[in-house]
Amino acid sequence: MEEETVTDHRNGKEESVNGEESMNEDESPLVNVDDLQKDPAFYSDAAAYWETIPATVNGMLGGLGHISTADISGSDAYLKSIFKMKNPPGHGRAVDCGAGIGRITKHLLQKHFGKVDLVEQCQNFIDKAKDNFKGSKKVTEFYCVGLQNFNPEPNTYDVIWCQWVLGHLTDTDLEDFFRRMAQGLKPNGVIVVKENVTSSGEVEFDKVDSSVTRPESEILDIVERAELKVLKNTKQPNFPKGLYEVKMFCFKPKHTHT
Ligand SMILES: C[S@@+](CC[C@H](N)C(=O)[O-])C[C@H]1O[C@@H](n2cnc3c(N)ncnc32)[C@H](O)[C@@H]1O
């Protein structure tokens, strides 16, 4: 996947398609999240936004393609630490949620799992991902669907990886999403969430890509409501200053399902 400089056609800034706004704490206004999330435009605006974004690593990371290496190396260390836990997940099958063009699958997940599925709502990105994994025996399932509607078969995944996408779900849909994902896990399976968190203690809205950034406490409240248990809670190291803090969480269902 090639890297490129992306010019933001809305404000003329270089390397700022979406993520500079959504990743830069200084620029996000506070909003009434309940009202915002009741508006169907919350989803349709996000879908329309991503339709305009180039299917490249730089596009996936809002012009911050240069942080991809540090991101993947932090995730690799994290995933290895998950495999060292007592009762670790297996290496059989993972799913990359909000996968974009498959950046994480390509550089991380396919190295650790026998099979990796992709879920992504933007058709352009799915097409690019199919191209990127042409001929792959591991990466063969591409689901073009919003995570708010993704419903995996029970007992399917060892690891469900969700990165830089959950801010596109409303609180209610995120709780329901976690509950469905819990059903989709194999025994010892885990859900990994890697997301920006605010330091203001408030939920912040990015109107450019129609996403929210939650404080850690809000993410953990939703996780608690979804009856998940926190196994790990770690900060991503080695990211440039001026961005939101990025946290990696590992969750499993509080109650084992049958
Ligand atoms: C910031 S990019 C991150 C892509 C990928 N996770 C990565 O880190 O390379 C956000 C991705 O989420 C996708 N997305 C946005 N809303 C979504 C939704 N409701 N369901 C599934 N994917 C969504 C976008 O199309 C885009 O591919």
Image (cartoon, rainbow, N blue to C red):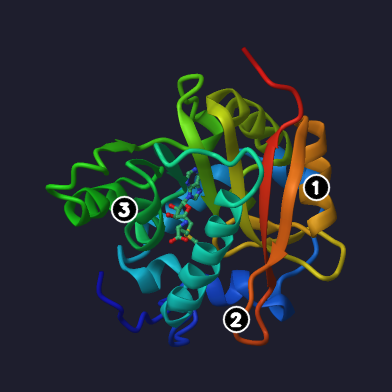
Q: Would you place residue 94 above or below residue 32 in this image? A: above
- Badge 3 residue CB within 8 Å of ligand 1: yes
* 3 and 2 marks in contact (CB < 8 Å): no
The residue tagged 3 is 125
Res. 209 image quadrant:
bottom right
**Residue found at x 54% / y 56%:** 79
The residue tagged 1 is 220
Q: Would you place residue 94 above or below residue 70 in this image? A: above
Q: Would you place residue 66 above or below residue 60 in this image? A: below
The residue tagged 2 is 239
**Residue found at x 32% / y 41%:** 114
Query: Please, what is the three-letter code of the amino acid marked with disc 3?
Result: Phe
Q: Nearer the viewer, residue 112 or 118?
A: 112
Q: Nearer the viewer, residue 200 or 87?
A: 87
Tell me the SS state at disc 1.
helix
Distance from disc 3 to disc 2, alpha carbons, whole Å, reads 25 Å
Bin the neighbour count of mark 1 within 10 Å (Cα to Cα): few under 14, some 14-19, many 20 and up: some
Query: Please, what is the three-letter code of the amino acid marked with disc 2?
Result: Phe
Earlier in the chain: of badge 3 and badge 1, it is 3
Q: Nearer the viewer, residue 176 or 88?
A: 88
Q: Looking at the figure, which quarter contains the C terminus?
A: top right
Residue 184: image x %, image y %? 53, 26
Earlier in the chain: of badge 3 and badge 2, it is 3
Residue 177: image x %, image y %? 61, 32
Residue 41: image x %, image y %? 58, 44
Tell me the SS state at disc 3.
helix
Quick check: can you spot residue 153? yes
Query: Please, what is the three-letter code of the amino acid marked with disc 1?
Result: Leu
Tell me the SS state at disc 2.
loop
Of marks 3 and 1, the one in the foreground: 1
- In the image, taking residue 181 as reference, residue 118 lies left or right, namely left
